[in-house]
Image (cartoon, rainbow, N blue to C red):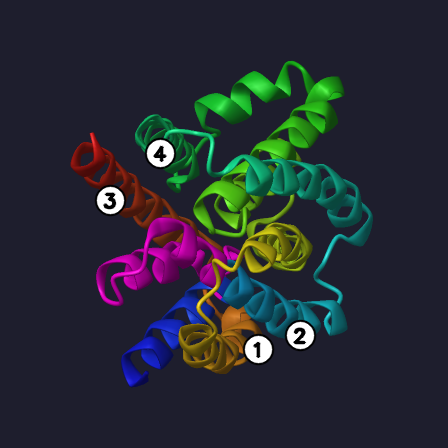
């Protein structure tokens, strides 16, 4: 239980700083340390992501850092994807999903890495600025699907979409993503809870740690350089992509 609390603490802190909810840490930890099946780890993680989102977005909303109109609109599309993924989680083979997600994360990491000029994706989008909102809506559905399938809250895609596609400053993208992922994760979590996939005894320790880590990170995150946070985000994406490839090869 103490280990799970510490895992939740780390997940909540990183989640609040990067707008990702912490599921990227919680799911592998529950799978590898607690030995939970993937579906049980995903369901438990989604509950923790809800807690992290509630804690961090409360701070961000009070400070006016959340782009509410954008967050509310994209949240609708993300919830649709999360519910569909939750309902179909048992029907989709896990191995191709791992490989596809790893490729997507690697590409996103490349685009998010801090550089002097605009990245390839930003240059391409600058030529089709009128359709950026539609691109963001489609990406929000994809973030919801990723959330429901892998228990990561969708923030791993929300933050890059808000920053790279819609052009929000990185720290405002983080705050808006932290707000969005709560509803997305809740939509997916309800399906897992109804199926009995959530381990109640484990989720309590992890959720308390998540809450304890998210609030201080949200309060102090504005003091950290956005360039540094982008670099950390990119490295985290690469690490998760590597883990996804390993998991996919193990299940092959």
What residue appears at the point 64 percent right and 57 percent down from the top-left corner?
186
Check contact, mark 1 vs mark 2: CB within 8 A. yes
Q: Which residue is mark 3?
A: 243
- 67 part of magenta stretch: no
- Chief secondary structure of the magenta portion: helix
Secondary structure of the residue carrying tag 1 is helix
Cα gap from disc 2 to disc 4, whole angstroms: 36 Å
Single out the mark in the foreground, 3 or 2.
3
Residue 65: x and y in percent read 70, 62
Magenta residues?
17-45
Q: Earlier in the sequence, mark 4 or mark 1?
A: 4
In the rendered view, would you say 97 is above or below 180?
above
Q: Which residue is mark 2?
A: 59
Single out the mark in the foreground, 4 or 1.
4
50 displayed left or right of 75:
left
Residue 238: x and y in percent read 29, 42
Q: Which residue is mark 1?
A: 219
Cα gap from disc 3 to disc 1, whole angstroms: 30 Å
What residue appears at the point 72 percent right and 37 percent down from the top-left corner?
77
Q: Front-most of 36 and 6? A: 36
Check contact, mark 4 vs mark 3: CB within 8 A. no
Check contact, mark 3 vs mark 2: CB within 8 A. no
Q: Which quarter of the rendering shows the C terminus?
A: top left
Cα gap from disc 1 to disc 2, whole angstroms: 7 Å
- 42 part of magenta stretch: yes
Q: Earlier in the sequence, mark 4 or mark 3?
A: 4
Single out the mark in the foreground, 4 or 3.
4
Q: Which residue is mark 4?
A: 94
Residue 112: x and y in percent read 43, 39
Single out the mark in the foreground, 3 or 1.
3
């Amino acid at each position: 239980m103490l280990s799970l609390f510490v895992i939740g603490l780390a997940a909540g802190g990183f989640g609040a700083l990067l707008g990702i909810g912490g599921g990227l840490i919680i799911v592998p930890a529950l799978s590898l340390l607690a030995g939970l099946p993937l579906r049980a780890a995903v369901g438990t993680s989604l509950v923790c992501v809800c807690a992290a989102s509630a804690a961090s977005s409360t701070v961000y909303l009070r400070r006016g850092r959340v782009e509410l109109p954008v967050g509310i609109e994209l949240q609708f599309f993300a919830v649709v994807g999360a519910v569909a993924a939750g309902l179909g989680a048992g029907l989709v083979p896990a191995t191709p999903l791992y490989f596809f997600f790893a490729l997507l994360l690697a590409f996103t990491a490349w685009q998010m890495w801090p550089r002097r000029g605009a990245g390839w994706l930003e240059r391409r989008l600058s030529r089709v600025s009128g359709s950026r909102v539609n691109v963001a809506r489609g990406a929000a559905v994809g973030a919801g699907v990723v959330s429901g399938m892998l228990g990561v809250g969708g923030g791993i895609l929300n933050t890059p979409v808000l920053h790279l596609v819609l052009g929000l400053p990185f720290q405002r993208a983080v705050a808006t993503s932290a707000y969005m992922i709560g509803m997305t994760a809740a939509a997916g979590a309800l399906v897992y809870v109804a199926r009995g996939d959530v381990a109640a005894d484990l989720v309590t320790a992890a959720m308390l740690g998540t809450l304890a880590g998210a609030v201080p990170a949200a309060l102090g995150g504005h003091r950290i350089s956005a360039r540094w946070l982008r670099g950390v985000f990119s490295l985290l994406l690469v690490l998760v992509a590597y883990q996804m490839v390993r998991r996919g090869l193990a299940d092959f």
